[in-house]
Amino acid sequence: MEKQNVQTMPRRQKSDVLNLFKGLACISVVFVHVHFPGITGIVVHRSFSSFAVPVFLMIAGYFAFGKDESVIKRRFFKILKLILFGISWLSIKKSIA
């Protein structure tokens, strides 16, 4: 029996610079959801909301590209659970208020 020639994607190396950008994007996403008073709030919200989520998703996608399908499915279901929890929490919070 011959071995099948399976072409695999090269493993992505962890990059300190990309991890730094990903961390800054995470913090910026939090700042999008925190409301600061006055002109500071306007500046922070406008500056961070324009780049935070797209940068974070691009870097996360870069590291996810070429991963095994089972890893992607596992991550997808973890995120789906968080989204469903958030929707449930907001629904309960709204019904109580």
Image: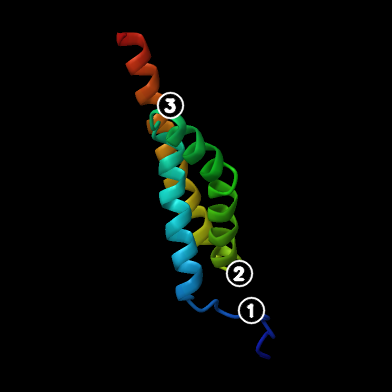
Amino acid carrying label 3: it is Ile
Find the residue positioned furthest to the left: 96
Q: In x, y percent, where is residue 90?
A: 38, 22
In the shown orientation, is residue 39 left or right of residue 64? left
Q: In x, y percent, where is residue 36?
A: 39, 32
Q: How many marks?
A: 3
**Which residue in the structure is indicated by mark 2?**
66
Nearer the camera: disc 1 or disc 3: 3
Element type at marker 1?
loop
Identify the colour scheme used: rainbow
Cα separation, mark 1 vs mark 2, equals 8 Å
In the shown orientation, is residue 66 left or right of residue 39? right
- Which tag, 1 or 2, sits closer to the chain's start? 1
Element type at marker 2?
loop
Quarter of the N terminus within the rendering: bottom right
Element type at marker 3?
helix
Q: Residues within 10 Å of mark 2 (few under 14, many from 20)?
A: some
> What residue is shown at x 58% (from left), y 49% (from top)?
51
Amino acid carrying label 1: it is Thr
**Which residue in the structure is indicated by mark 1?**
8
Q: Looking at the image, do the residues carrying marks 1 and 2 touch, with CB atoms under 8 Å apart?
A: yes
- Which tag, 3 or 2, sits closer to the chain's start? 2
**Which residue in the structure is indicated by mark 3?**
87
Cα separation, mark 3 vs mark 2, equals 31 Å
Q: Residues within 10 Å of mark 3 (few under 14, many from 20)?
A: few
Amino acid carrying label 2: it is Gly
Q: Looking at the image, do the residues carrying marks 1 and 3 touch, with CB atoms under 8 Å apart?
A: no
In the shown orientation, is residue 89 left or right of residue 75? left
Cα separation, mark 1 vs mark 3, equals 38 Å
- Which tag, 1 or 3, sits closer to the chain's start? 1
